[in-house]
Amino acid sequence: MYAAAAAPAYAVSGDLFFTSNGACKYPGNSCNNHPKGYAFYFLVTSTFACASSVSVTNITWSGAKCPTATLPTPAPVISVPSGTSSFPLTAYAEMSNSAQTNCTYTLTFSYTDCHNNTYTKSQSIYIPSTPPDCVCTA
């Protein structure tokens, strides 16, 4: 007979995920910093009982109407405290026609839990619209 082994005390007991927090389109050709551009807002949420950190390493898109999105360089490391917490991440995009659009983005990210275990995960997020209400900042 074999005895059942207990799960290690450091077993993962939470998750880390992104959700859409809206998007907008900048006025066509009128912003110096984002001509014909878009902003996509994401929230990173952690349900770990301990602090963790996350770094988004890649963003890709699917669909012909998706503008090419870029992340800040270098990719920011977001520190997420223990418990359910949400923190923002903004990605910017450009497209030649500056039309309102919808599409799906896939974020690839690495995160480290409080036991220094590192994971890599990809998650697709649908952006339903890009209303024309971004504000030029420069």
Image: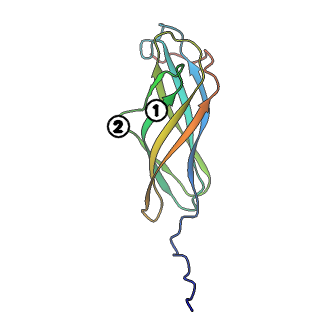
Name which residue lies at 58% across and 59% down: 14
Q: Are marks 2 and 1 in contact (CB under 8 Å)?
A: no
Judge whether 44 appears above or below 27 on screen. below
Q: Assign the N terminus to one quadrant of the image.
A: bottom right
- Which of the two residues, 60 or 129, is positioned nearer the viewer here? 60
Q: Position of residue 70 (x, y in %)?
A: 42, 28
Going by the picture, which residue comes out furthest to the bottom?
Answer: 1
Q: Tell me if 77 is positioned left or right of 15 in this view.
A: left
Q: Which three-letter amino acid code belongs to the residue tagged 1? A: Thr
Secondary structure beneath dot 1 equals strand
What is the number of the mark on residue 74? 2
- Which of the two residues, 106 or 35, is positioned nearer the viewer here? 106
Q: Position of residue 18 (x, y in %)?
A: 57, 42
Judge whether 47 appears above or below 3 on screen. above
Q: Which residue is mark 1?
A: 60
Q: Residues within 10 Å of mark 2 (few under 14, many from 20)?
A: few
- How far is mark 2 from mark 1, CA to CA? 17 Å
Q: Assign the C terminus to one quadrant of the image.
A: top left
Secondary structure beneath dot 2 equals loop
What is the number of the mark on residue 7? none
Name which residue lies at 50% across and 9% down: 97
